[in-house]
Image (spheres, rainbow, N blue to C red):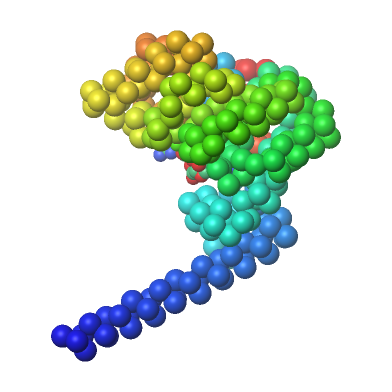
Amino acid sequence: AKLAGRNRAVEYRSEFDANAVERLQLVRHLRDALDNGEFTVLFQPQFGCDGRPLGIEALVRWQHPVRGLLAPAEFIGACEESGLMQQLGRQVLLEAASHHVRLVEAGLSGLRIAVNVSAAQFTEELYTDVEYVVRTLALPRGALELELTESAVMQSPEHAITLMQRLADLGVCFSIDDFGTGYSSLAYLKRFPIDRLKIDRSFVQDLDRNAQDAAICRSIIELAKSLDIGTVAEGVETVQQERWLRDHGCVALQGYLFGRPQRFDALLDDLRARGVE
Ligand code: C2E
Ligand code: CA
Ligand code: CA
Ligand code: CA
C-alpha cells in the first residue's frame, strides 16, 4: 500500500509538472500572439423589442496560426493569471472602438459598442486606455459601453464607484454582465452608475420550461425597472424565449436567434439586409 501510494504521488507529480509546462508554453505563445497581433474581435448585435439594433458586443478571438480561430475559454484564464489581460484588453478596446467611424458612415451612429472588461483589467490603467481611445477616436458620449462583472465591481465597491464615475465623465456607459450569477449587494447596485443589467444566458436558456429561471428573469427585469435602468437578455435562441422576454418588459435581446458573433463587415451587411440604415 505504501508503494502504491508513493507511485500515485509520483504520477500526480509528473501530471502536475506536465500541466505546468503546458501552462508556461501557453503563456509564452500568448505573449508572442499579442506582439504579432493575432487577436481579433467578432461582433454580436443587440436588438430592442421593436427590432431596432441598439448595440454590438465585441467578443475576442485568437486567430491561432495552427489551431484556427480560438474562443476566449481557451486563453482568457491564462491571460488573467499571467498578467497579460491588461495588454489584451487594450488591443480589444482599440480594435472594437475603431469601428465606430464605420457605424457612423453606415448611418448607425446611435449603436453602442460594448467591450468586456474582466476584474483583472478594472484598474487605473483601464482609465488611461479608455481616455486615450475616447480622445484619439473622438468617440461621442454613449458610443462605448463597458461590460463589467459583479465580481469586478464588488471586490472593492468604493473604488469601483469612483473609477466608474470618472469613466462615465468620459462618456462611457456600463452594463453588469452575467447578472444574477454573482452576488451583488442591492445597496451598492443603486450607487453604481450602471445603465443596464445583462441577464445571464444560464437563466434565459430554460426560461420557458423552468419556473425558477422564469422567476429569476422576472425579478431581474423588475429590479432594473425599479432602478430605472435597462436590461439585455443574453443567449436568446428561440422565438419562445424572445416572446417571453418581450412580454415581460426586457429592453434588449441578444443571441443566436438574432445573430452569431461575426466579422464587423458581415455584421454591417446583415444590419443593412434587415433594412435598418
Ligand atoms: P459573455 O460576456 O457572457 O459573452 C456571451 C457568450 O455567449 C459569448 O461567448 C457568445 O459568443 C456566447 N453567445 C452569444 N449568444 C449565444 C446564444 O444564443 N447561445 C449560446 N450558446 N451562446 C451564445 P464567447 O464569445 O465564447 O465568450 C465567452 C466569454 O469570454 C464572455 O462571456 C466573456 O466573459 C469573455 N470574453 C469575451 N471577449 C472578451 C474580451 O474581449 N475581454 C474579456 N475580458 N472577456 C471577454
Ligand atoms: Ca459580455
Ligand atoms: Ca454570460
Ligand atoms: Ca462574462
Residue name at image x 36 percent, y 28 percent: 204
From the viewer's side, name the closer residue of 234 and 82.
82
From the viewer's side, name the closer residue of 245 and 117.
117
Residue name at image x 56 percent, y 66 percent: 26
Residue name at image x 39 percent, y 20 percent: 220
Identify the image quadrant of the N terminus: bottom left
Q: Position of residue 109 (x, y in %)?
A: 72, 20
Image-quadrant location for residue 218: top left
Q: Position of residue 242 (x, y in %)?
A: 39, 20
Left or right of 97 on screen, residue 160: left
Left or right of 256 on screen, residue 145: right
Image-quadrant location for residue 268: top right
Residue name at image x 51 percent, y 74 percent: 21
Visible residue check, residue 235: no
Image-quadrant location for residue 211: top left
Q: Is residue 25 above or below residue 142?
A: below
Q: Position of residue 232 (x, y in %)?
A: 48, 23
Q: Is residue 1 above or below residue 101?
A: below
Left or right of 258 on screen, residue 140: right
Q: Is residue 220 above or below residue 1?
A: above
From the viewer's side, name the closer residue of 184 and 236.
184
Left or right of 144 on screen, residue 213: left
Identify the image quadrant of the C terminus: top right
